[in-house]
Image (cartoon, helix red, strand yellow):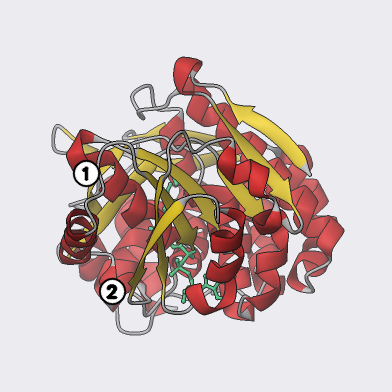
């Protein structure tokens, strides 16, 4: 097992990464100060892993809430069902909430923990690759709105993250690829050495080589933890770099209907769109664009825009992005591979040209 901390002063917490961690009772018990535990999972993950978590917490009083599966359920009305279950079972402020599942469960459980009785402890137990490398770390929690992705939420850090690599054995190939998209993102925005490693080892990830997956999860979490420690609340612009590809990607997720394109797939193509604009700005070169595209292709990620979205659809959805400030849209673009920049100083005509080009390809 590998352990390291997200350094946030008195809110610092460990990330545990390794095999068979769900069975390690002490990892849970060390971070649960009282008897009351409330586990949130979903109808797909619970039959696979709930028993193991219940067993690890068997000395405690555990309640369970099973959510419907899918991004389309990441809504405020699902959160209300969590509040009702917490209240019906008389959970008080001393309850620790455990999120057992992918990013959808983690984001919602985290938001419920942040807001129930003004905040209760919670533990992230991410079971998808995407959640292990990204969403379980850093404290962003929330839900979607019909008008925009992740528009309602809060920053709220967990007590710890327990990333059991064995859970990835049951993940669909498509979901595994979606996680690889966020892994590639770290190489692109700030870790050139990791990007080189990915170029050599991407097939090993696709083929689920355990050693390669362990390295990639660890390296991704290190990158994320470093950025989060520097700019926890996304105020200085550093954390915003983690949203490389996301402004375009969120437009795809909202435009296509939540759940039709997976988050990681939308981010993958969003990264190519951002790279396309970076070339037009004269920053990124064509050869490096081809290297990014190749990595996505080998990882079975989309390299074409959704057929039925127009440039106008993109503009419309991008205008409600959280990176709009004082009416100005900020985008994360690439100076080069391994170096991203948050900027509003791009040429709007070039953005239009990127959207037209991508939508008609
Ligand atoms: P997800 O939670 O929908 O999980 C994908 C699918 O895999 C679901 O059907 C799920 O039930 C299933 N699943 C989960 N674990 C499994 C396992 N071990 N075996 C078999 N099936 C399993 O999607 P995701 O990709 O994990 O997360 C995407 C969400 O995360 C999006 O809502 C996105 O906005 C959010 N996100 C949040 C952050 C953040 O910082 N909070 C960062 C990135 C993404
Ligand atoms: N996934 C973006 C962030 O955590 O900031």
Q: In percent of the image, x 54 and y 38: which residue is there? A: 160
Give the residue at the far top of this rendering: 9
* Residue 72 numbered mark, or none: 2
Identify residue for label 1: 116
In the rendered image, which quarter is residue 108 located in? bottom left
Tell me if mark 2 has few (under 14), some (14-19) or many (20+) residues whose alpha carbon lies within 10 angstroms of its own: some
Q: Is residue 298 visible?
A: yes
Q: Is residue 5 left or right of residue 121?
A: right
Q: In percent of the image, x 33 and y 77: which residue is there? A: 68
Tell me if mark 1 has few (under 14), some (14-19) or many (20+) residues whose alpha carbon lies within 10 angstroms of its own: some
In the rendered image, which quarter is residue 322 located in? top left
x and y, in percent, of residue 67 in the image = 33, 71
Q: In percent of the image, x 48 and y 33: which residue is there? A: 341
Q: Is residue 340 above or below residue 261?
A: above
Front-most of 228 and 82? 82
- Assign a secondary structure to mark 2: helix
Q: Is residue 316 left or right of residue 56?
A: left
x and y, in percent, of residue 184 in the image = 64, 54
Front-most of 101 and 356? 101
Q: Is residue 223 above or below residue 99?
A: above
The image quadrant where one finds the C terminus is bottom left
- Assign a secondary structure to mark 1: helix
Q: Is residue 185 above or below residue 103?
A: above
């Amino acid at each position: 097992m590998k352990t390291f901390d997200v350094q946030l002063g008195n809110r610092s917490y460990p990330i545990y990464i390794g095999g068979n961690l769900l069975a390690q009772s002490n990892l849970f018990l060390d971070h649960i100060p009282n008897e009351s535990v409330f586990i949130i999972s979903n109808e797909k993950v619970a039959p696979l892993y709930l028993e193991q978590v219940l067993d690890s917490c068997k000395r405690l009083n555990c309640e369970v809430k099973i959510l419907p599966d899918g991004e389309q359920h990441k809504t405020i009305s699902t959160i209300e069902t969590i509040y009702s279950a917490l209240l019906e079972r008389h959970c008080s402020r001393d309850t620790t909430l455990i999120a057992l599942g992918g990013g959808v469960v983690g984001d919602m459980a985290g938001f419920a923990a942040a807001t129930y009785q003004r905040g209760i402890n919670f533990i992230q137990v991410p079971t998808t690759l995407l959640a292990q490398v990204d969403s379980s770390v850093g404290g962003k929690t929330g839900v979607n709105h019909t008008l925009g992705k992740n528009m309602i939420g809060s920053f709220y850090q967990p007590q710890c993250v327990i990333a059991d690599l064995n859970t990835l054995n049951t993940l669909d190939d498509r979901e595994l690829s979606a996680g690889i998209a966020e892994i590639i993102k770290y190489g692109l925005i700030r870790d050139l050495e990791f990007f080189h490693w990915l170029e050599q080892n991407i097939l090993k990830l696709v083929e689920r080589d355990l050693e390669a997956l362990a390295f990639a999860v660890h390296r991704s979490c290190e990158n994320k933890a470093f950025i989060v420690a520097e700019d926890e609340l996304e105020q200085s612009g550093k954390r915003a770099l983690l949203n490389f590809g996301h402004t375009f990607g969120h437009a795809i997720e909202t435009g296509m209907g939540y759940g039709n394109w997976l988050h990681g797939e939308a981010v993958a193509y969003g990264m190519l769109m951002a790279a396309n604009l970076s070339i037009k700005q004269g920053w990124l070169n064509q050869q490096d664009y081809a290297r990014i595209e190749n990595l996505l292709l080998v990882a079975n990620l989309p390299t074409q825009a959704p057929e039925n979205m127009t440039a106008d659809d993109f503009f419309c959805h991008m205008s409600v992005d959280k990176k709009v400030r004082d009416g100005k849209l900020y985008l994360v673009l690439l100076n080069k591979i391994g170096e991203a920049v948050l900027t509003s100083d791009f040429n709007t005509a070039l953005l239009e040209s990127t959207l037209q080009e991508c939508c008609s390809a």
